[in-house]
Image (spheres, rainbow, N blue to C red):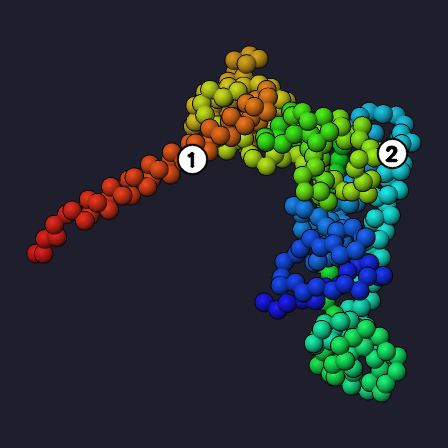
Amino acid sequence: QRSEVVRCPNPDCSCALTVDGGRQRWQCCEWPAWCTKCRQPYHYKVECEAVEGLCKRWLQWVSTDRSTYHQEEVQHSRFETQRIALEEALSRHAELQRDEEWKRANCRECPRCQRVVEKLEGCDQMICGQDAHGGNRQNGCGHHFSWNEARAYRVAPESRPLPQLNVEEVRLRGANLRHPFTHCSSCEQDIVGPRFRCIHCPDYNLCVTCERECATCATHPLNHVFEILFKADYDLRAHLPLGSHVLIADHSERHGFEAILEHEICQDVFQVRLLSDNSERQLHRSAVQVKLETSKAVEAHVKAHVAAQVAEAQQVAAKRQQAVSQMRGTDCVVG
């Protein structure tokens, strides 16, 4: 895999580093830590192509959806500073993309140091860092090469558009959702409902209440983008022992009703009994939500599933070993 020379996005910094594929977090000056793949502020847990889409989603939340979610008639003025900071960050991202597109159309890379080179006029003979016939000296390695043989400039990863969020979707998909092994970084309580995860911090999460209260908190940068998560890192429905209390989540007229798993009809299909009227219905695993009251109960549920998986794997290994032993102990009879 070919190494890439990546330069700091700070125009006043001359730092460059060699990257052997992938993306890395780098900080070389007063500029915020940046991603070596897209040269944007470094982002955890999300790929470069999703950053701009998440930023637009977050800007929409900050601008209007937050107040709608909390049923506030007027957008609080204290949210305005956060909105402006996000718009400035999005503007810088768009400016970088325009610059990247211009360089793709007009520039090549030096074959030796991969510095961006622009051809203004004249023949195809180039010298990295100066005009071919002398003068106009700039930073460069001095390598002689032909313009036509140089590799075209490759732009940073292009953004991938994301569907817009709907406030009702946030309410519906986030209702009663618990996130095991994750606590709010502000109130340090369990996160129930949508989880707000900062993509620029290694581990910073907020519950929906603290997200609103910390909108202008001085302890966290206002231009940081949050990803709104409606799905826990662990799917509680992967482990559904009989007798479990669940909530119906099939978007029917019984959506949100509590029920008990009676028995498994076939793989992933269960017979459930509603607690409201003792009626029964058949539901797929994907149409229920495990009802657990505390994060400790959620974590115990996850640990029970892991233990069940380990026990199952041990049983499979034991049966395999038994079969192998029987094969080795059987006398082969040649007829």
Question: Dot 2, how many residues are within 10 Å of its Cα: few (below 14), some (14-19), or many (20+)?
Answer: some
Displayed quadrant of residue 267: top left
The residue type indicated by label 2 comes to Phe
| Vertical relation: 158 (above or below) 169 | below
The residue type indicated by label 1 comes to Gln
Q: Which residue is depicted at the point 70% across and 37% down?
A: 204
The front one of 323 and 20 is 20
Please tell me how many numbered marks the rendered image carries.
Answer: 2
| Rendered-image quadrant of the C terminus | bottom left
The front one of 64 and 209 is 209
The percent position of residue 62, horizontal first and vertical second, equals 82, 36
Q: Secondary structure at mark 2?
A: helix
Residue 283, visible in the rendered structure: no
The percent position of residue 244, horizontal first and vertical second, equals 49, 21
Mark 2 lies on residue: 79
The percent position of residue 121, horizontal first and vertical second, equals 86, 82
Left/right of residue 229 with respect to residue 142 in the rendered view: left
The front one of 302 and 249 is 302
Mark 1 lies on residue: 309
Q: Which residue is depicted at the point 67% across and 39% down?
A: 203
| Rendered-image quadrant of the N terminus | bottom right
Q: CA distance from mark 2 to mark 1?
A: 46 Å
- Sooner in the amino-acid sequence: mark 2 or mark 1: 2
The percent position of residue 301, horizontal first and vertical second, equals 51, 27
Question: Dot 1, how many residues are within 10 Å of its Cα: few (below 14), some (14-19), or many (20+)?
Answer: few
Left/right of residue 42 with respect to residue 120 in the rendered view: left
Residue 92, visible in the rendered structure: yes
Q: Secondary structure at mark 1?
A: helix
